[in-house]
Image: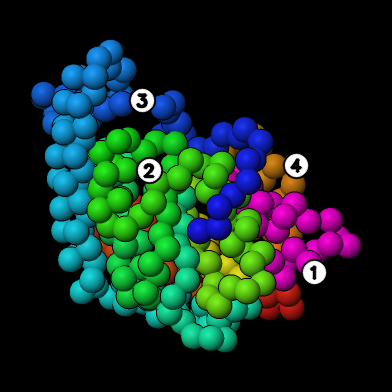
Amino acid sequence: FPQPQPLRTMSWQTVSRRKGRGPAIAKTNCTTGSTEVAGLGSVASAEASSEVVAAAGRRLEARVRERASLLQSSSFMAELETLVRAARSRARSGVAGTTGGQLLCLGIGSVEMSNASACQLAAAWLLAEQLGLSSRAWADPQMRAADVAAANALGFEALEPEVALQALTAAAAAEAATSPVLLFMPHCDRALYERVLLEATGGRVAEHAREAALQLFANVVLIGNSFSLYADRDELRVVPEGSPGAPGATNLICEMRPFIQEELLPEYAPCSEAFNDLAVLSFSSDKTR
């Protein structure tokens, strides 16, 4: 990914069960075997902790690869790859083909703490392998040290959230890009989708700048929550005002909906909570409806 310039301090999180955590080192819980956030006060402890983290990372990598082996033969994964390839071919820079490019994952959570997160990372890894995406990054404030180690083993660079968003802005705006950016955001909070739309369009959301904004986002393919479902719920007012799924002061999801082509993904029965209500979305400067 392009090297980002310093960005203002920001925070974000996915749905409420994924709270952010501050910088820390990991230690092992002897009962559960999971790594916990903890401060260690000596070099010897830090060295011991690094060995624990490496071992935990190998276990998590094996877990993700196991989930990937199940996903690989599923009709869900076949449909996901087909839809992503089609969306990439429609993107601004997709004329050169449907392989190569960049993958950025936001909001997957902790593979160590969640089976759904393990399935989501497995799907992202399979897509990267199938599409030849050697540039892979992952950002989530819930990531633990063992998650980072496992992701590194699978070819993903761990980024701070604010760095990841600026990298997305730079990648989407790159005129020399030969392949579109694939943005993998399953089950993120609505506010994060809105923030990503704002960042990827360089903040150009005023009516007079809408065309320029859409030109920027035309270089992005998004795997995330269905925007159509958000729009339907907004229209029916089924989500209470102020709750995580309700529209905010700006509603870019609905404003950009006429310029979005959306394809819903099928259910994945072995872990339905990992992929329910997801879609593949691509963007155009011309109205699609």
Q: Quadrant of residue 12?
A: top right
Q: Amino acid at mark 2?
A: Gly
Residue 143: tell me if it is visible: yes
First in sequence, mark 2 or 4: give its number.
2
Question: Sequence order check: which comes first, mark 3 or mark 2?
Answer: 3
Q: Earlier in the sequence, mark 3 or mark 1?
A: 3
Q: In whole angstroms, how far apart are the C-alphas of marks 1 and 2?
A: 33 Å
Local SS, label 1? helix
**Main SS, magenta residues:** helix
Structural distance between the alpha carbons of marks 2 and 4: 27 Å
Image x and y of residue 116, in percent: 30, 49
Residue topped by disc 1: 211
Query: Where are the magenta residues, as a range?
Result: 189-218
- Magenta-colored stretch includes residue 148: no
Dot 3 and dot 1 residues touching (CB under 8 Å)? no
Please tell me which residue lies in front, 222 or 241. 222
Query: Which dot marks residue 249?
Result: 4
